[in-house]
Image (cartoon, helix red, strand yellow):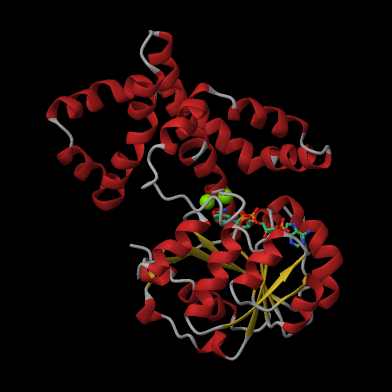
């Protein structure tokens, strides 16, 4: 089995005398900053004036314009949206980099697809939590951790891996397990996972099930509880004990339906399409499309997003969740949730 790093395998020292600048205070940014501070590390936040700046200050951090934060820090973690990183890097990060600094990412997109090309004399590493930012914080506060991948692209100091591991420990990832990887593997598997399974595949599955019930004349509220709400309850069982524990907990009737009908929903053709999705990621085709979409000010992204928000599953879901205040959401606290 591949080596998995836990707290006991990782020295904190490489990071303990260093200042970390967290650029961005969104989903990942707030979680990294708060967890690192609670783990005893020295953190400063780099931002533009706005909502995130207010939040970071309210949480007790020193907040600086990006360039000043980079200048003040030894380790610079870029937790800006992937599509904004290039412009901010060129204007506000690169001018302040020098050979004593390390540049870090939570996703390899801009390095792997060569949108950002750092100078050769800085360390470049990746600490990519395998979970949404809100969970990176929530699970840490509860004493656990969200697992992470670490990778080193440039090891100018000879210490980049130790630094990356110490950072991963600081955000709580080594409570769950840290794996080493490459920027290429992290980027391609992360994009594939979120597109085919976690976000794209899941959203399409939930919607198709809901629509099938609605079109057959069933009540939208019943269809919502069946196809969306209960998803979490089932996924919690899978998270705790794998598919076998989920199958142990459900009825034998449900398990028989799982065995016989699951492969009729996700067919050989679905898997062939997954392979084509992966090929588009590996070839850079997906990256090119997303970069161009952003350069065009997101006409398709915005149009699809508007339609999706009006889907009947969202309309009925908003009404039903309003009656379930025990369902906690951190939406108000942080602007976005992405994988
Ligand atoms: P968010 O969109 O949640 O947050 C982005 C932050 O960047 C906000 O605080 C925003 O502040 C700030 N920002 C945006 N533009 C600028 C700018 N020009 N100058 C200064 N600050 C700016 O990002 P995510 O946390 O989702 O993503 C960050 C990185 O983490 C990405 O590389 C992503 O791939 C990776 N990642 C994300 C995961 C997730 O759970 N979301 C999971 C694993 C990796 P403002 O309020 O001013 O807009
Ligand atoms: Mg991911
Ligand atoms: Mg991702």
Q: Residue at x 47, y 25 (%)?
A: 207
Give the camera-side residue of 160 and 102: 102
Frontmost residue, 123 versus 52: 52
Disc tally is 0
Q: In this view, does 185 lie above or below 290?
A: below
Q: Nearer the viewer, residue 121 or 101?
A: 101
| Quadrant of the rendered image containing residue 155 | bottom right
**Residue ID at (30%, 41%):** 233
Q: Position of residue 220 (x, y in %)?
A: 41, 19
Tell me if I can see residue 150 in this picture.
yes
In this rendering, position of residue 302 left or right of residue 263: right
Q: Looking at the image, is 151 positioned above or below residue 21?
A: above
* Position in image of residue 87 (x %, y %): 82, 57
The answer to whether residue 153 shows anywhere in this view is no
Q: Position of 317 compared to 254: left or right?
A: right
Residue at 22% from the left image edge and 41% from the top image edge: 246
User: Residue at the location (59% across, 91% down)?
Assistant: 17
Give the quadrant of residue 311.
top right
């Amino acid at each position: 089995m591949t080596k998995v790093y836990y707290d006991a395998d990782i020295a904190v020292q490489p990071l303990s005398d260093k200042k970390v600048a967290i650029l961005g205070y969104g989903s990942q940014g707030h979680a990294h900053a708060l967890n690192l501070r609670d783990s005893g590390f020295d953190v400063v936040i780099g931002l533009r004036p706005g909502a995130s700046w207010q939040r970071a200050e309210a949480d007790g951090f020193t907040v600086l314009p990006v360039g000043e934060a980079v200048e003040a820090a030894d380790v610079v973690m870029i937790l800006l949206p992937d599509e904004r990183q290039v412009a901010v890097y060129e204007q506000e990060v690169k001018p302040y980099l020098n050979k004593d600094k390390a540049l870090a990412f939570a996703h390899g997109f801009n390095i792997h697809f060569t949108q950002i090309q750092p100078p050769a004399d800085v360390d470049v590493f990746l600490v990519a939590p395998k979970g949404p930012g809100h969970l990176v914080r929530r699970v840490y506060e509860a004493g656990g951790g969200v697992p992470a991948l670490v990778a080193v692209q440039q090891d100018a100091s000879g210490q980049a891996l130790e630094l990356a591991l110490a950072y991963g420990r600081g955000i709580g990832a080594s409570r769950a397990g840290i794996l080493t990887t490459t920027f290429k593997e992290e980027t391609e598997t992360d994009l594939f996972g979120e597109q085919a399974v976690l976000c794209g595949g899941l959203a399409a599955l939930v919607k198709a099930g809901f629509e099938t019930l609605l079109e057959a004349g069933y009540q939208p509220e019943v269809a919502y509880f069946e196809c969306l709400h209960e998803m979490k309850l089932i996924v919690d069982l899978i998270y705790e004990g794998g598919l076998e524990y989920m199958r142990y907990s459900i009825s034998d009737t449900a398990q028989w339906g799982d065995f016989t009908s699951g492969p009729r929903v996700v067919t050989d053709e679905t898997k062939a399409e997954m392979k084509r999705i992966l090929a588009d990621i590996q070839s850079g085709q997906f990256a090119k499309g997303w970069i161009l979409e952003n350069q065009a000010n997101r006409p398709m992204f915005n149009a699809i997003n508007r339609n999706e928000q009006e889907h009947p599953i969202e309309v009925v879901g908003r009404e039903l969740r309003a009656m379930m205040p025990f369902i906690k959401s951190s939406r108000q606290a942080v602007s976005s949730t992405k994988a």
